[in-house]
Amino acid sequence: SDLIREVYREHNPSKLETVDTLLDKYVGQEQDLYLMICKKYGVRAKDPEGLGDMDWLNTAEEQLARLIESLVSVVVLHGSGLQADDAKRLAAWEEVRPRPPPSRLSHRFELGALPVAQAEQLVRGIHGENNVKWRRLQERCDGAEVKAPVSGMPAIQNRDRNNSGPTRALTVTSNSGSKKGRE
């Protein structure tokens, strides 16, 4: 809280009176809150927990996007049953190809097999109070389409087999062929 007050004191003194309210709202997420405020005001974050140099935060979003793209690629290749010889040929092709091929990657986490109470709890956790967590997830997944059921929706309670109506799954889709999807 002292670090947050320090940033506000220097960059936006009118916000000083809201610090306690913010801390109450973000209980358990104080460091994330501090880092968000530092980013907003272009302040280099101090290292309150002695974790070392925090310069990595400047490129963290960029690195995370590359990591997620790599992980999605691995999941897709693993799920396709790719054999070792095929993987070697694919790796050789990756080295010489002129640009990434357009591809739409999607992963679907089905909630229909879960007990209703467990699915409902998971959905509430994804959305958070007043959809705060859901909005934050949407912001962090810029360039990807993320869909999830809404808490209390009939799709979780009524598990019809025809898969019509609102989604009963958490779905993440990204078009890695577009610049926005690769970010």
Image: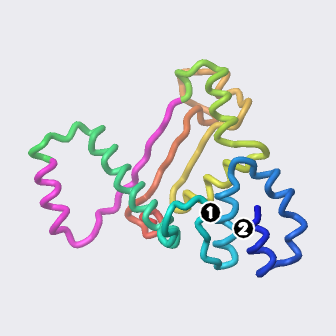
Residue 53: % across, % down: 49, 69
Estimate the x, y position of residue 134 in percent, counting from the top left. 67, 48
Give the amino acid type for the residue marked by disc 1 in the picture: Pro
Expressed as whole percent of the image width and height from the top left, the position of residue 29 reads 68, 52
Q: Is residue 112 left or right of residue 156?
A: left
CB contact under 8 Å: marks 2 and 1 = yes
Residue, disc 2: 3
Task: Please tell me whether residue 152 is drawn above or below residue 51 in the rendered image.
Answer: above
Q: Residue at x 51, y 72 (%)?
A: 58
**How far across and down, in percent of the image, does residue 141 sit?**
55, 57
Q: Is residue 102 above or below residue 16?
A: above
The kind of residue on which mark 2 rests is: Leu
The quarter of the picture where residue 18 lies is bottom right
What residue do we see at 39% from left, 62% from top? Answer: 66
| Residue sticking out furthest to the top | 115
Q: Which residues are the magenta region?
A: 87-110
Upstream in the sequence, badge 2 or badge 1? Answer: 2
Q: Secondary structure at mark 2?
A: helix
Q: CA distance from mark 2 to mark 1?
A: 8 Å
Is residue 1 on the magenta stretch?
no
Mark seen at residue 48:
1
